[in-house]
Image (cartoon, rainbow, N blue to C red):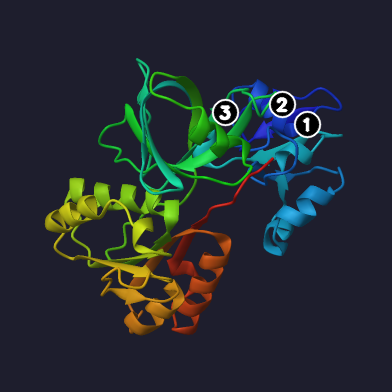
Amino acid sequence: MTISLNGGRMIHAPAGRSLFAALRSNGILVPTACGGKGACGLCKVRVRGDSSPLQPAELSSLSGGELADNVRLSCQVKPVNDICVELSTDVLAAREFKATVESVLNLTHDIKEVRLALLPPGAISFRPGQFIVLRIPPYASSRFAAFRPFSLASSPARPDRLELQIRRVRGGIGTTYVFDHLSPGASLSLTGPYGDFWLRESGRDVIFIAGGSGMAPILSIIEDMADRGISRKAVFFFGARAREDLFHLDRIASLQKRLPELRFVPALSAPAAGDGWDGERGLITEVLERNVRSVADVEAYLCGSPAMINACVGLLQRKGLCESRIFYDKFTSYRL
């Protein structure tokens, strides 16, 4: 079968082979967290002319709008005729990189910072807010390599140095490796960059909302704003459970000095008695309700758990913020 890519380049797929495998064998690095097993929902592409039936994994991973727009999971499509595939620019531009682990540091009891140095001539060009996919090598708890997406927390001003914030998932193959086995000097491979979560060049005021390791892409965006002198009025709401779950406070304070229009609002949902916390309390939606009044000329950027994002999106829309000005990156906890 012949596969047309964005109406231009043509590749071939042997009968019975998945579109995902055909793309990757031709150097097109579609993102994945499950290695093409239909369990992660990352390998979305738009397919036209395909007559193969939708698979259960697609019906559970794709929205009604995506299905209506001919979006498929490439790992579930086994072409039975010539097809046309539309790929996003980030997937077409994604490359594989080799890296050395420079440091692994504790940010909180369940979040580690991993710093990577890309091996020469490695330099990754990315937009702040995008993510990479890290290859997790086989180790004691996993006989096979695994793949995990992680947002970049670093500024693109240093394209050969990458920073990740990784939160432990109980029983997760990827995070167990990072927390219990990864050490400085280790060699890793990664692909990317991926994703369409980045700051739009609109000039509007900005609301950032994050929780836990969802700080990573927001921090990358804010670092880039400081590096480029973007002085848009912005407020960063960060939700945590207790005081010990806050991190990078000094770094954010330093960024505020470079960005006078940036306000940081940390909020604790369950502060410990006697810890002296005098900041915002409650769920992040409660904090937004108290602090966000007008959304007339605002864009919102959210990153964190699906439950948090869904709740915050609903609240912002009730306040009048239209869907087209809400951007988010939902973090999924992969255990497979």
**On the rendered structure, is 233 left or right of 144?**
left
Q: Upstream in the sequence, badge 3 or badge 1? A: 1
Q: Amino acid at mark 1?
A: Ser
Residue 327 locus on image (x, y percent): 46, 61
Q: Is residue 14 left or right of residue 205?
A: right
Which of the two discs, 3 and 2, sits closer to the camera? 3
Residue depicted at 49% across the width and 41% down the height? 150
SS of the residue under disc 2: helix
Q: Quadrant of the N terminus?
A: top right
Q: Is residue 307 above or below residue 229?
A: below
What residue do we see at 68% from left, 39% from top? Answer: 85
Residue 148 visible? The answer is no
Query: Do tag 2 and tag 1 residues touch (Cβ < 8 Å)?
Result: yes
Q: Which quarter of the figure is the C terminus placed in? A: top right
Q: Tell me the distance, in whole angstroms, between the alpha carbons under discs 3 and 2.
A: 22 Å
Which numbered tag is attached to residue 317?
A: none
12 up-or-down from 265: above or below = above
The residue carrying pointer 2 sits among few (fewer than 14), some (14 to 19) or many (20 or more) residues within 10 Å by Cα, namely some
Kind of residue sitting beneath label 3 = Ile
Q: Which residue is mark 1?
A: 18
Q: Which residue is mark 3?
A: 136
Residue 166 x/y as whole percent: 46, 43
- Badge 3 vs badge 1, beta-carbon distance below 8 Å: no
Asked whether 36 or 214 is in front, the reply is 214
- Residue farthest along the front direction in this orientation: 274
